[in-house]
Image (tube, coloured by chain):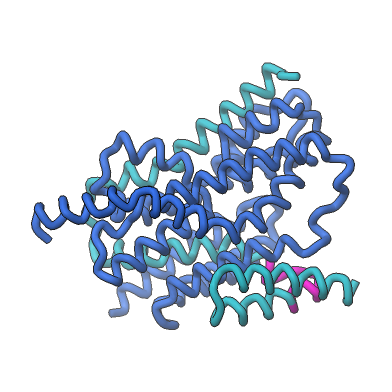
């Protein structure tokens, strides 16, 4: 049920992940940033978000690309829940239609 | 803002603690639509690699970072290469450094004994809604801008869903088949696009995002593995650094 090497690997993952979670906060907690560094930190959240979903923009599946375009349009004018429903719905329907 | 005003604002925030927690739960609900299918898939894949129904929640409950868990499971062998797994986890989760740094100005006023445990629940979703909420409240003049109970509500619901449904995935694995084919994968970009719109401050401010998007997409196409997140995020930051010098 529980293998010692598996537990060791899981503990290593958990330790590394927790350090990444507290790292940015611990390093910047007591610092005042220069205007330039502030500009960089202001851009950072968007840069991370868009990088995580970048693969969706170069999907090889035309149905997914079309669904992403619809989702993008929905995201510019609707709130979270309708956008998610439209995104998932259009992806499901388009995948079914376009194979 | 004077010390007494800050104290007053803190008092108001505490009195509405339950409401704020529930607001966080509600904010994270649409995201569960995207998280649950992923959790089922991860659990099923982990079971295929030989992890038991006890080991899967151990991983997803202690590590609680889906991207790194997918990457680790892809590379999982029996016995696992501990150093390789730790290194790939660091690579995939290095974005947390930036996320924590972005959150730092908003949580600076909170005591460390609250912040350090709270950061355990910082995942893409809880961070993004927590930060977007803090930015919105800051713009509306609310102090403190960051609502800890709101963030904890969002983080806890994602956490419970992740651990519960990865376990279900491990138990049900072979029965489910390919969950991804139903279009649930689109929930993730949908959530992120709405959050990006909330952070939108005009095209000029968004130029680093465009750099991130292009570099991450190209890296994804050319380089195998999870490098695209680090490459995209870092190039966007470099672009922001240079663009800030133009002013």
Viewer-proximal residue among A90 and B70:
A90
Viewer-proximal residue among B141 and B92:
B141
Q: Is residue B122 left or right of residue B165?
A: left
- Residues drawn in magenta: A56-66
Q: Is residue B115 left or right of residue A7?
A: left
Viewer-proximal residue among B163 and A4:
B163
**Apparent colour of chain A:** cyan
Hey, which quadrant is residue B81 in on the image?
top right
Tell how many labels: 0
Residue B217 horizontal/vertical position (percent): 64, 67
Viewer-proximal residue among B167 and B41:
B167
Identify the residue at image location x=53%, y=55%. B125
Give the residue at the far top of this rendering.
A4
Is residue B3 found inside the magenta-colored segment of the image? no
Q: Is residue B34 left or right of residue A39?
A: right
Q: Write down which chain is painted blue.
A: B
Identify the residue at image location x=85%, y=47%. B176
- Looking at the rendered image, the quarter that the N terminus of chain B falls into is bottom left
Identify the residue at image location x=61%, y=79%. A74
Q: Magenta region, mostly helix, strand or loop?
A: helix
A42 is higher (above) or lower (below) than B9: below
Residue B4 horizontal/vertical position (percent): 9, 53
Identify the residue at image location x=54%, y=41%. B90
Residue A56 horizontal/vertical position (percent): 68, 67
B199 is higher (above) or lower (below) than B38: below
Hey, which quadrant is residue B83 in on the image?
top right
Residue B91 horizontal/vertical position (percent): 56, 45
- Looking at the rendered image, the quarter that the C terminus of chain B falls into is bottom left
Hey, which quadrant is residue B228 in on the image?
bottom right
Is residue A65 found inside the magenta-colored segment of the image? yes
């Amino acid at each position: 049920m529980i293998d010692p090497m598996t537990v060791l690997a899981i503990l290593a993952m958990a330790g590394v992940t927790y350090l990444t979670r507290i790292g940015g906060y611990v390093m910047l907690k007591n610092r005042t940033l220069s205007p330039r560094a502030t500009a960089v930190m202001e851009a950072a959240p968007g840069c991370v978000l868009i990088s995580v979903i970048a693969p969706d923009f170069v999907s090889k599946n035309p149905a997914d690309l079309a669904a992403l375009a619809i989702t993008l349009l929905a995201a510019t004018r609707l709130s979270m829940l309708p956008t998610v429903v439209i995104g998932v719905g259009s992806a499901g329907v388009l995948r079914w239609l376009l194979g | 803002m004077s010390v007494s005003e800050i104290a007053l604002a803190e008092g108001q925030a505490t009195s509405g603690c339950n409401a704020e927690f529930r607001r966080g739960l509600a904010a994270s609900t649409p995201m569960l639509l995207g998280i649950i299918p992923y959790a089922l898939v991860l659990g099923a894949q982990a079971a295929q690699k030989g992890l038991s129904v006890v080991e899967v929640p151990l991983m997803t409950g202690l590590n609680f970072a889906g991207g790194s868990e997918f990457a680790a499971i892809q590379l999982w062998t029996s016995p696992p290469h501990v150093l390789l797994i730790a290194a790939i986890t660091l690579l995939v989760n290095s974005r947390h450094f930036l996320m924590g740094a972005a959150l730092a100005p908003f949580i600076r006023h909170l005591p460390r004994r609250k912040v350090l445990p709270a950061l355990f629940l910082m995942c893409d979703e809880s961070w993004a809604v927590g930060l977007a909420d803090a930015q919105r409240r800051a713009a509306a003049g609310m102090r403190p801008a960051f609502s800890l109970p709101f963030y904890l509500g969002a983080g806890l619901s994602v956490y419970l869903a992740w651990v519960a449904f990865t376990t279900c995935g491990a138990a049900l694995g072979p029965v489910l088949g390919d969950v991804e084919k139903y279009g649930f994968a689109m929930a993730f970009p949908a959530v992120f696009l709405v959050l990006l719109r909330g952070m939108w401050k005009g095209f000029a401010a968004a130029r680093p995002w465009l750099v991130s998007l292009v570099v991450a997409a190209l890296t994804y196409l050319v380089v195998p593995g999870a490098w695209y997140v680090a490459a995209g995020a870092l190039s966007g930051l470099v672009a922001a650094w240079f663009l800030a010098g133009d002013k």
